[in-house]
Image: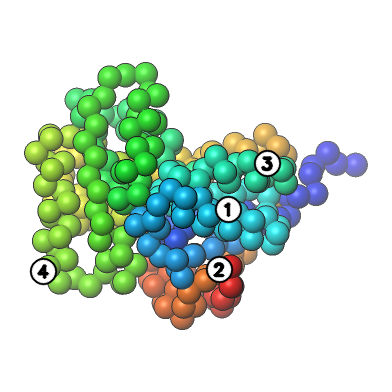
């Protein structure tokens, strides 16, 4: 007789507009290796960062519904633009299926508030995330006075999603996004888009070596682990679980880029029409 939930064998579902969420999946694969995963890249609708709140909520609900129908025990929103506009909608829908949602934004705000010495925190994010103000609200909830400088980077996720061509023009573009953060003398910068950790070395160089970069992957994996334990739905597998990828755009391009970024073979990428 066991009091484990039969849902423990379902996968953890992760979604993003493209390959950026692989930076979060990577942390989950490392922290919770025995779990199974399904990753959805909604690359047909990339970029999310240029969408309105209403459009983003529609994307979030579509992705959430699809992943719930496929069967999942925990949903991870690994996209800041999506979480910024649609976290509450996703939570409502998932709750009706008894599934919890963990997401980016709040975890990075907590980390940034905890590690900044000067209280000057930068946020580099997509236009949608900056305009939605979710980081300002999340940082405002922390128990200390913070001065926040936000910078919207309209092209950066798209440059990365294209496979990051290392041209001088791209380098100058990235440098220009970092300049206002340097001027504001921030000591901590939240990489507020899950694509950005994929170019971390370049960002670190332009921001300065002393600036601390905050990403969400590790904190999200820890939050996922806490929920699995509390709800007694952690996998009873021993050894490594499986992972599967689905996308809405070009499966070959997704596989090629994803393999490069995740540094693991992706296997077959299934094309889905959402
Ligand atoms: N990775 C996504 C984010 O975290 C966004 C990129 C995009 O689709 O614009 O916001």
Q: Secondary structure at mark 2?
A: strand
At which x and y percent is residue 179?
Answer: 11, 47
Sequence-first disc among 1 and 4: 1
At which x and y percent is residue 105?
Answer: 41, 40
> Which residue has dot 3 on it?
95
Residue farthest toward the right in the current orientation of the protein: 1
At which x and y percent is residue 80?
Answer: 41, 48
Q: Secondary structure at mark 4?
A: helix
Sequence-first disc among 3 and 2: 3
Q: Is residue 12 placed above or below 88 in the rendered structure?
A: below
> Which residue has dot 1 on it?
61
Rendered image: mark on residue 231: none
Within 10 angstroms of label 4, few (less than 14), some, or many (20 or more) residues?
few
Q: Secondary structure at mark 1?
A: helix
Spatial distance from mark 4 to mark 3, Cα to Cα? Answer: 47 Å
> Image check: 204 left or right of 130?
left
Sequence-first disc among 4 and 2: 4
Q: Nearer the viewer, mark 2 or mark 1?
A: 1
Q: Kindly tell me whether residue 241 is visible in this rendering.
A: no
Quadrant location of the N terminus in the rendered image: top right
Within 10 angstroms of label 3, few (less than 14), some, or many (20 or more) residues?
few
């Amino acid at each position: 007789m066991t009091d484990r939930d039969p849902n423990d064998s379902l996968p953890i579902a992760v979604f993003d507009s493209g390959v950026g969420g692989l930076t979060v999946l990577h942390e989950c694969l490392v922290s919770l290796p025995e779990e199974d995963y399904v990753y959805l890249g909604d690359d047909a609708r990339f970029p999310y960062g240029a969408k309105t709140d209403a459009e983003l909520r529609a994307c979030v609900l579509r992705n959430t519904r699809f992943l719930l129908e496929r069967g999942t025990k925990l949903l991870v929103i690994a996209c800041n633009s999506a979480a910024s506009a649609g976290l509450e909608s996703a939570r409502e829908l998932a709750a009706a299926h008894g599934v919890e949602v963990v997401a980016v934004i709040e975890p990075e705000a907590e980390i940034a508030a905890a590690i900044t010495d000067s209280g000057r925190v930068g946020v580099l994010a997509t236009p949608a995330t900056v305009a939605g103000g979710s980081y300002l609200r999340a940082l405002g909830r922390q128990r200390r006075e913070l001065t926040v400088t936000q910078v919207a980077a309209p092209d950066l996720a798209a440059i990365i999603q294209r496979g990051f061509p290392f041209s001088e023009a791209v380098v100058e573009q990235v440098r220009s996004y970092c300049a206002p953060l340097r001027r504001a003398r921030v000591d901590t910068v939240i990489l507020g888009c899950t694509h950005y950790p994929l170019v971390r070395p370049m960002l670190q160089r332009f921001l300065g070596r002393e600036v601390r970069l905050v990403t969400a992957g590790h904190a999200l994996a820890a939050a996922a682990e806490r929920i699995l334990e509390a709800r007694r739905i952690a996998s009873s597998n021993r050894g490594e679980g499986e992972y599967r990828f689905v996308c809405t755009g070009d499966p070959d391009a997704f596989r090629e880029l994803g393999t490069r970024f995740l540094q693991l073979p992706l296997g077959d990428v299934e094309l889905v029409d959402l």
